[in-house]
Amino acid sequence: MAQALGVSRASICNAAKSMAASHLSIDRVRGRGYRLNRPFEWLDRDAVMALTGKAGRFDIEIRDSVDSTNSALLRENGPHGKVLAAEMQTMGRGRMGRSWLSEPGGSLTFSLAWKFDRGAGFLSGLSLAVGIALARAMASCGIAGIRLKWPNDALYQFQKVAGILIEVKGDMLGPTLAVIGIGINFRLSGALRENIDQAVTGIDAIPGESPGRNRLLAAILAELSGILETFEEKGFDAFRNEWNDLHACHMKQAKLKLPSGKTEEGRVVGVSEKGEILIESSRGRLAFASGEVSLRGIS
Ligand code: ATP
Ligand code: BTN
């Protein structure tokens, strides 16, 4: 390996050590070299571009490692249409300061920067519309049974398989730069699962053939292309029925955790034209925007 790469044996040895530190499991055979214990398909810009059919709308970049693809696009102000995917995130983020955990090759983590002429208020239902892009893309790749959980998760049999984090930058009245971050599990090691405090799964554990990360990324971008256009024109209302049909918690009893620390209990009866969750409670029908509200205790 040292010869082929034109580096010293010590460099190869150090690289192998840092791979182990990144949770990459490698086999070593004395005198012969190293290989990944479970080989995976690397992210490949050209493959994704060729597969999307919408290549012109997106500028795709793949980085080996970044703190968070959302943080990077926010720092770099997009630009509009930029897609940043990373083999590894060292500080992947979820909502409200929570962490998104992943290991190299085990997940698809990427963000898309998209400029909207309108202000941040208009974008309140965007994470729900992006959820539809995820569900449609997964279905088009043969992954059946994906449902959505308000406001930003994709589930398979009530286990979280993907999450969406949208962060916006700009004036309240617009224009706004939205950074749309998506994390999708393909395979989860035992060590990773132990650090996640909820039921989780990955695409490789769902029956059927795994589409591979490049194909799924291309399919999501193709769906997002149309969905973002419609969203800009018509807002979330255009997706409301489809979203309600995909909601894993539709008509179920649930608790809503509010920013005040209080909870509100009731039956989930759908989402509004703005993407708020609608709950039928003892106090009547109530609507909550995603803000810092969490849906819990589904039964
Ligand atoms: P909410 O209903 O408020 O959105 P949530 O638990 O889905 O609740 P998020 O902020 O959306 O919270 O996502 C972050 C959470 O996702 C983490 O606290 C952790 O429980 C979970 N998590 C972290 N990494 C992964 C992963 N790779 N796969 C699935 N879930 C993960
Ligand atoms: C959630 O469930 O709260 C959302 C998780 C979003 C994770 C993705 S991974 C790519 C992008 N970069 C981040 O730091 N977060 C999002």
Image (cartoon, helix red, strand yellow):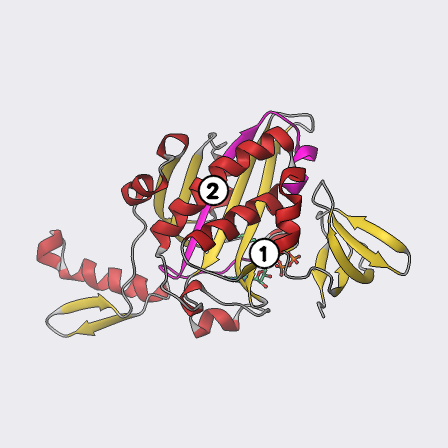
**Extreme left residue here?**
3
Foreground: disc 2 or disc 1: 2
Q: Could you say where residue 230 lies in the image, as x and y percent from the top left?
A: 57, 33
Task: Using the image, tell me which numbered label, if any, was put on residue 153.
Answer: 1
Left or right of 84 in this view: 29: left
Task: Note whether 220 is above or below 77 in the view shown.
Answer: below
Q: Residue 1: give its label.
A: none
Q: Tell me which numbered mark, 2 or 1, is placed earlier along the sequence.
A: 1
Stretch in magenta: 98-125
Determine which quarter of the picture holds residue 58. Answer: top left
Whether label 1 lies within 8 Å of ligand 1 gets the answer yes
Does 20 appear above or below 60? below
6 w.r.t. 179: above or below? below
Residue drawn at point x = 61 percent, y = 55 percent:
246
Q: Ligand 1 shows up in which quadrant of the image?
A: bottom right
Q: What is the residue that sits farthest to the right in this orientation?
A: 283
Tell me the element at label 1: strand
Is 110 inside the magenta-drawn segment?
Answer: yes
Q: Is residue 154 left or right of residue 137?
A: right
What is the three-letter code of the residue carrying label 2?
Answer: Glu
Q: Quadrant of residue 173?
A: top right
Question: Where in the figure is residue 293, as x and y percent of width and height?
Answer: 73, 53
